Image (tube, grey):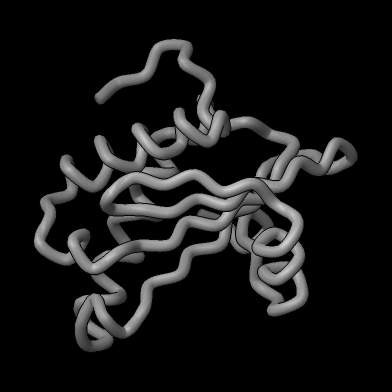
Amino acid sequence: MRKSYRVKKEAEFQEVFTQGKSCANRQFVVYMLEKPKQPHFRVGISVGKKIGNSVARNWVKRRIRQSLTELKPQLKQDCDFLVIARPSVSWMSTKEVKQHLIHVLQLAKVLNDDQIEK
């Protein structure tokens, strides 16, 4: 995922976190903030130290980024959202990560339901 598709700055994270709407399942929490003038979506990924060491955290972030890249055509384009991973994600396969991410993104109404491949 290109850098233009990422929420990188602390102030931007805080804006989505404080003003956005949240949705969660057992594996992920998603905060979503609509930005109508934005040309495409941006995503921020947060993986806490409860997940494990840096190797485990980076593994989880790579799986989340890969899933979002595959879901890119179905994602809402005029919003910023944060994906926060919970500790149970560290034991899941790539396929399970994608399935649970699809579920929470549908709950948050970030994902269009058209032609979703699970």
Q: Reply above or below: 45 against 34.
A: below
Q: Reply above or below: 57 against 98.
A: below
Quadrant of the snapshot with the C terminus:
top left
Q: Reply above or below: 87 against 64.
A: below
Q: Nearer the viewer, residue 114 or 104?
A: 104
Q: Position of residue 28 (x, y in %)?
A: 36, 53
Residue 93 falls left or right of residue 117: left
Q: Nearer the viewer, residue 34 or 69?
A: 34
Residue drawn at point x = 11 percent, y = 51 percent:
93
Residue drawn at point x = 35 percent, y = 65 percent:
61
Q: Position of residue 15 (x, y in %)?
A: 76, 65
The outermost residue toward the top is 114
Residue drawn at point x = 35 percent, y = 62 percent:
85
Q: Position of residue 5 (x, y in %)?
A: 63, 53
Q: Position of residue 69 (x, y in %)?
A: 43, 43
Q: Quadrant of residue 47?
A: bottom left
Residue 10 falls left or right of residue 35: left
Residue drawn at point x = 18 percent, y = 49 percent:
94
Q: Reply above or below: 19 against 117.
A: below
Q: Quadrant of residue 67?
A: top left
Residue 78 falls left or right of residue 58: right
Q: How many marks?
A: 0
Q: Quadrant of residue 16?
A: bottom right
